Image: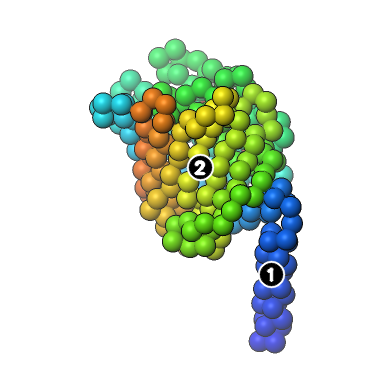
């Protein structure tokens, strides 16, 4: 057991390290400061191990008409690479059994597959199609993969209040030339490193969509999760809302639960 004095020294070292990071963020170039912010967002979520949750996807058109889909989402943290995720749709009937598998990578194109029960086959999503809509929603395939730091270059823009706390606004530019975006502007609070909003700009550098994050909750593993997200398409007037529930960490999941055979097992 550590003594009180050793605990105090450890705490002081941690505070000094955080202060050093903060100082570098204040005095570095816009690129260094932007990268620092992105690294803090990434560090805040390290160690979640795995996650299982339920979600309701609500699609709305310009006239306000809506359709609702239910799904289960499983995620697995991978050391030295991006996360793996498996999304399984349970309703309505026309999409029931549809499953989407994603392997995110830091530097290489993501691997993504879609199982379509009506066709009884697995379709690989081409990296050329990453900007396409996911299941008719306003989320693109590239939006629903884990956002690894290496996928972007960064620039610090300004300080601004985010989610009721002192926060930062940074710009990130996709490294992949096949991305559907020229840039994204990200708002994040500087206390818990929770995302507040992301604006997406299309290949003409015009604002395309805004993703907002609301209703955050901190779980027993100290990780924060937004339980309501909304993607608004400013050019079409359509929107997609994701509402999360029954979020659980530390479940009995292995890599085998995220291989291509997992798509066939959900039939």
The N terminus is located in which quarter?
bottom right
Residue 239 found in image quarter: top left
Q: Which mark is residue 258?
A: none
CB under 8 Å between discs 1 and 2: no
Locate residue 116, reporting x and y percent. 45, 19
Q: Between residue 102 and residue 67, name the one nearer to us.
A: 67
Q: Between residue 211 and residue 110, name the one nearer to us.
A: 211
Locate residue 42, reporting x and y percent. 62, 51
In the image as oriented, which residue stretches furthest toward the top? 119
Locate residue 169, reporting x and y percent. 56, 50
Classify mark 2: residues with Cα within 10 Å, few (<14), some (14-19) or many (20+): many
214 lies left or right of 146:
left
Q: Which mark is residue 19?
A: 1
The C terminus is located in which quarter?
top left
Taking the image as drawn, is residue 250 in sight? Answer: no
Locate residue 203, reporting x and y percent. 58, 25
Q: Earlier in the sequence, mark 1 or mark 2?
A: 1
228 lies left or right of 21:
left
Task: Give the mark count.
Answer: 2
Q: Which mark is residue 198?
A: 2
Q: Secondary structure at mark 2?
A: strand
Residue 22 found in image quarter: bottom right
Q: Between residue 82 and residue 189, name the one nearer to us.
A: 189
């Amino acid at each position: 057991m550590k003594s009180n004095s050793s605990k105090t020294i450890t705490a002081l070292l941690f505070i000094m390290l955080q202060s050093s990071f903060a100082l570098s963020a204040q005095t570095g170039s816009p690129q260094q400061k932007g990268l620092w912010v992105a690294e803090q967002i990434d560090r805040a979520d390290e160690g979640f191990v795995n996650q299982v949750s339920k979600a309701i996807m609500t699609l709305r058109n310009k006239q306000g008409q809506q359709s609702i889909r239910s799904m289960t989402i499983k995620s697995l943290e991978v050391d030295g690479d991006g996360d793996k995720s498996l999304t399984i749709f349970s309703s309505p009937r026309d999409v029931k059994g549809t499953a989407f598998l994603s392997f995110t990578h830091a530097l290489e194109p993501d691997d993504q597959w879609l199982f379509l029960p009506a066709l009884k086959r697995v379709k690989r999503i081409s990296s050329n199609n990453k900007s396409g809509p996911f299941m008719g929603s306003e989320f693109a395939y590239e939006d629903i993969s884990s956002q690894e730091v290496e996928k972007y270059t960064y620039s610090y823009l300004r300080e601004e209040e985010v989610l009721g706390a002192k926060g930062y606004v940074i710009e990130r530019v996709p490294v992949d030339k096949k991305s559907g975006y020229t840039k994204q502007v990200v708002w994040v609070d500087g206390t818990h490193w929770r995302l507040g909003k992301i604006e997406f700009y299309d290949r003409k550098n015009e604002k395309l969509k805004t993703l907002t994050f609301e209703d955050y909750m901190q779980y027993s593993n100290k990780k924060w999760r937004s339980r309501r997200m909304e993607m608004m398409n400013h050019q079409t007037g359509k929107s997609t809302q994701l509402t999360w529930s029954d979020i659980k960490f530390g479940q009995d999941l292995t890599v085998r639960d995220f291989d291509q055979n997992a798509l066939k097992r959900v039939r």
